[in-house]
Image: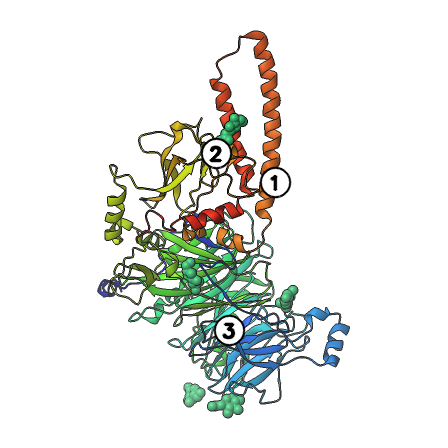
Amino acid sequence: MASGCRLLPLAVTLLGFLNSSVTTLMPRVSFSMGSPGRRLTRFSSADVGNTTTLLLSEDCDTLYVGGRDAVLALDVSLEGGIVLRNKLDWRPSEKDLEQCSMKGKKMADCPNFIRVLLFLNATHIYACGTFAFSPRCVYINSDTFTVSLKPDEGRGRCPYDPYQRNTAIIVDGELYTGTVADYRGNWPLISRHLSEGSRVDLKLDDTLGWLEDPTFISSTFVPDEGKIYFFFSEVGREYDFVDKFVVSRVSQVCTSDVGGQRTLQRRWTTFAKAQLLCQADGELPYNVLQDIDSLPPAADTPADDTLFYGIFTSQWSVNLGLSAVCSFRLADIKSAFSGGYKVLNRDTLQWSTRVQERVANPGECGLHNASDNALRFVKENFLADDSVRPAGGRPTLVSAEHRYSHLTVQRVRAANGVDYVVLFLLTESGYLHKAVLLPTGAHVVEEVQVFVTPQPVKSLKLSIPKGLIYVGTSEGVLRLPTANCSFYWTCAQCVLARDPFCGWDAARRVCTGLSAPDLGQDVEGGNVEKACDSVTSVHRARFGPNNLPAGEPLPVSLHEVVRLPCPAASRLSRQWWERPNSRLSPELFLHLDDGSLSFVATPATLGHYLCLSAENGFRQTVAVYHVKQKSAPPPGPPGPDAAPGPNFTLWMVKAAPKEAAFRDGDPLLAAQTPSYFKELVAVSVLLVLCLSALLAVLLYAVKQRWRSRTVPQRADVHGRNSAEHDALRSGPEESKRNGHVRGALDAASNGHLPNTPI
Ligand SMILES: *[C@@H]1O[C@H](CO)[C@@H](O)[C@H](O)[C@H]1NC(C)=O
Ligand SMILES: *[C@@H]1O[C@H](CO)[C@@H](O)[C@H](O)[C@H]1NC(C)=O
Ligand SMILES: *[C@@H]1O[C@H](CO)[C@@H](O)[C@H](O)[C@H]1NC(C)=O
Ligand SMILES: *[C@@H]1O[C@H](CO)[C@@H](O)[C@H](O)[C@H]1NC(C)=O
Ligand SMILES: *[C@@H]1O[C@H](CO)[C@@H](O)[C@H](O)[C@H]1NC(C)=O
């Protein structure tokens, strides 16, 4: 193994051997809903809801969607939008609904919620729905989109209750499911259906302890092993000292299983389960599995390197993070199943480590015609002694801020030939995070808002060949590309993003996808100097110490309040202001919370201002302003209601729109959609300012009176300063009116930032 590793090519995947880090997984860039930088394509229809079961055709051009009372075929091959191609109505009759509500169920839960939607063979789709708490399954012809046979009974294939989670997978025309198989939800089952000929349908034996109140999450087929793996969480009875301790599990069955001949007839002979442990040494485990996705091994690596990435949350609130991601190697799962097994004492219902002689290997395929003795042994020994520990011995990432619910994973080959694992993680609050796993920890490239109100059921589907992600929610289906490289408009931004999907094409001067050769990219280091040679020299030439940039000219009148905005380049950058050959004394300059600089124009404050930003060791000039006195008579306020008088004209200077788009809350969007948040803030700020001004005036009056009694009047330096400060403070008061002021200045500006390569 060790020597084999040495022979592996450069494109060795980082097999998840990553440092766990309870870091602030701060997304570098945030796109709110509808932001032009990350456009979403949406499909929703008034008569179709709860569109949460997604199935993508092999050519990735059709997305089949299971919704409420309907199965849809959506044409997703067009870039412009998602088009409904076919719709199959499949709803319970009035009588069914009546019976459902007579049984005491809420009418809203009685429709047919589609919970299984899988390809059966080349011509048919198999679908199951809750059907008014009386589950059913049908065969759908995928061309004509008609139901071709009379419905199957859905018991054991689909839950009765639409809020219960289930999992299903079809291999060679047989359906393997994990679901509760009764109306009350007390009988959990892992079973096989649609078997034909000498093969028989199989299920778990009815004896105790196979499954303990499980929540099924996912299932996957590993062809090399001939096994189906089920992932779920359940009550961990082996930890009988903790009440209702939840554990996460992987379980397995062999597809070759046909049950025993006398013992375990029509029952699994190959079922085994093991604990999945998402835990760092000395810390409490993240014990509740939320979602899991598999990452096939890289080309030329053995199937044992298959990884399973799971989201876990904790049963206890004392954990440091809200959720964690752990990855598990197939090799580790296999070795847990081939080790020792615990044995259940059926009288005391206690688990113990086995002491009797081992007469069979539980979990081994091909036990169907083993002796009764061996099968009895298998029946008693199905819980592996060893837990499966995460790859690298600890969680891949732990988030203190976000509760993740769903994930999907892909491997991306970067410009330098190294493979990186990229996770797409859906937060409960409706953001999709894109995280690239680096040797130093996870880096969250971006977050995109995909829904606003919390969704009870969600699903994610990744289309790797097309570079698209689908999100299914109760409200509809959304599509977004895995990356939008053209959003980064300079080499520095492109490299700092550290997005393995994007690199800088120096010839065409664009940030682009990885199809082009020789791209500037540094996923691990984000080193701009290294990856963007040419741009940096341009940058230096233009902004060397003796080479003052022209800057955005800004004519002002004396004594007027000037406000220079400086939009943040990213959430990971640090911004500050500089004046050549001068310092920004705190008495004259006000640093506002949004990063802008405010001051009163006096002969001393005219001149150049540079807003600088540093990220990942790279410094860049974000904006340069040249504040100078107006030569012509003042042209008057830019608009009739823009300012109370020329002394209080507020100047808003335009920043290039793309820069602005980086800001939290996305002003581009805010400008288009009505939002009263700004007004609210402005009014609140105004109120606070009024109150503090009143207080200041009172204090000042008291002080003056006191002073006039004790000392002779001082020179008015102090007075002027405080007047200036008052004038400064009146700045934000005006900002709520500046909508059209900004617009006017937009038109006047050349639209280029000083550091934008032209
Ligand atoms: C990518 O970003 C650019 C620049 O913000 C924007 O114009 C374009 O619409 C975006 N494309 C998508 C698909 O989001
Ligand atoms: C697919 O399965 C359906 C239902 O069992 C059957 O009618 C159909 O003939 C099968 N098609 C193929 C190509 O096997
Ligand atoms: C085991 O079963 C297979 C068929 O499933 C049969 O061909 C074989 O003879 C059996 N082996 C024994 C030892 O009974
Ligand atoms: C279906 O969607 C609605 C919102 O559109 C939601 O309130 C309801 O809980 C969903 N039902 C299920 C079973 O997910
Ligand atoms: C500014 O206000 C002062 C008095 O408050 C006034 O004397 C002066 O003319 C004003 N300046 C301009 C440019 O209007």
Q: Given the current orientation, which residue lies at the most extreme front position?
A: 633
Q: Which residue lies at the image location 40% right of the left edge and 40% below the top edge?
A: 554
Judging by the rendered image, the residue that carries numbered circle 1 is 683
Is the residue at mark 3 in contact range of ligand 1, meaning its CB lies under 8 Å from it? no
What is the secondary structure assignment of the residue under circle 1? helix
Residue 341 in percent (x, y) is at: 46, 66
Quarter holding the C terminus? bottom left
Q: In the rendered structure, which disc, 1 or 3, sits on the residue that comes first in sequence?
A: 3
Q: Amino acid at mark 2?
A: Val
Is residue 281 shown left or right of residue 175?
A: left
Q: Which residue is mark 2?
A: 561
Residue at 44%, 35% in the rendered image: 633
Is residue 251 or residue 40 the one in the foreground?
40
554 and 687: which is toward the camera? 554
Q: Is residue 257 visible?
A: yes
Compared with 439, 296 (above or below) is below
Q: Earlier in the sequence, mark 2 or mark 3?
A: 3
Rendering coords of residue 567 (x, y %): 43, 45
Q: CA distance from mark 1 to mark 3?
A: 42 Å
Gap between marks 2 and 3, in whole Å?
A: 50 Å
How far across and how far down the image is residue 329, in percent? 39, 64
Residue behind mark 3:
82
Q: Nearer the viewer, mark 1 or mark 3?
A: 1
The amino acid marked with disc number 1 is: Val
Callout 2: few (<14), some (14-19), or many (20+) C-alpha neighbours within 10 Å?
Answer: many
